[in-house]
Image: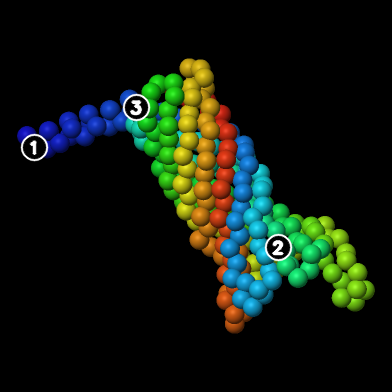
Amino acid sequence: MKKIVLVLTAVMLLTTVAAHAQWRVGATIGGDYNFYSVDKQYMTDLEIQGSPGLTAGVSGQYSFMDWLGMRVDLNYTQKNYQIHRAMLDKWEYNYRNDYLQLPVMAAFSFGGTKLRGFCNLGCYTGIWLNSHISGTDFNLFSSKWVSLNENVKFNSDRDNRWDAGLLAAAGLEYHIANHWAIQLEARYYHGLTSTTKSYMRVKDYRYNSTLAFQVGVYYVFK
C-alpha cells in the first residue's frame, strides 16, 4: 500500500511539473564595463582603469515551475581595460578582449502575468578569443612617441585563454504578446581564473570582473 501511495505521489508531482514546464528561446544585446584587477608589484605609477564594451548572444530557458527554471546562454562579451603611466602623460594602452562565454544559471521569477521580476544565479565558462591593443607608446631607440593599433599574439606560456567564474543577474520581464516577452537585465560576472599563468617566480595573477546591462527578446512556447 505504501509503495502504491509513493508511486501515485511521484506521478502527481511529475504531472504538476510537466503542466508548468515551458521552453523559451531568445537573443540578447547590450553593453558592459570591465574591471581588471592586477597586482602592480613595484610599478607604483601604473594606473589600470576599466573600459566599456559590447555583449550579445542567444539564450534558452526551460521553466520547471512558474517561478523556477534553468537558463543557458551563449554570448560574446568584451572584457576591455586601459593602462596608463602616471609619470608619462601620453603613455596609454587600450586593450579590447573578446570572449565567448557559456553561462548556466538557475532562473527565479516572481510577480504577475504581464510584468515579472527575476534573478539568475550560476556560473560560466568560456574562452578568450583574441586581444587587440591601441594607444601610444614611447620608443626608446628613436626617442619618439609612436601609435599602437594591432592584434596581440597569445603566448602559450603566459596567457590563460580558459575563463570561468560566478555570475548573478536581476531584472524585469514584460510579456508584450501571447508568445513574446522582453527583458531588461543587469548582470555581474566575477572571474575566478587568472588571465595569466604561473610562469614566473613572481606571481602575476590578473582577473576580470564585468558588469553588463542587456536587453533580451524571447519567444515563449506554450
Q: Residue furthest top?
A: 178
Give the distance between the C-alpha atoms of the residues marked 1 and 3, in whole angstroms.
27 Å
Q: Nearer the viewer, residue 132 or 86?
A: 86
Kind of element beneath mark 2: strand
Give the distance between the C-alpha atoms of the residues marked 1 and 2, in whole angstroms.
68 Å
- Residue identified by numbered label 1: 2
Q: Quadrant of residue 15?
A: top left
Mark closer to the chain start, 1 or 3:
1
Residue 18 image position (x, y, % from top left): 33, 28
Residue 140 image position (x, y, % from top left): 87, 75
Name which residue lies at 44% across and 21% down.
Answer: 114
- Residue identified by numbered label 3: 20
Mark closer to the chain start, 1 or 2:
1
Mark closer to the chain start, 3 or 2:
3
Kind of element beneath mark 1: helix
For discs 1 and 2, the disc positioned in front in the rendered view: 2
* Amino acid marked by disc 1: Lys
Say whether residue 127 is visible. Answer: no
204 vs 221: above or below: below
Name which residue lies at 56% across and 29% down.
Answer: 217
Q: Do the CB atoms of the residues marked 1 and 2 lie less than 8 Å apart?
A: no
Q: Nearer the viewer, residue 90 or 179?
A: 90
Q: Quadrant of the C terminus?
A: top left
Name which residue lies at 46% across and 39% down.
Answer: 170
Kind of element beneath mark 3: helix
Q: Quadrant of the N terminus?
A: top left
Give the distance between the C-alpha atoms of the residues marked 3 and 2, in whole angstroms.
50 Å
220 vs 77: above or below: above
- Residue identified by numbered label 2: 83
Classify residue 124 as left or right of residue 85: left
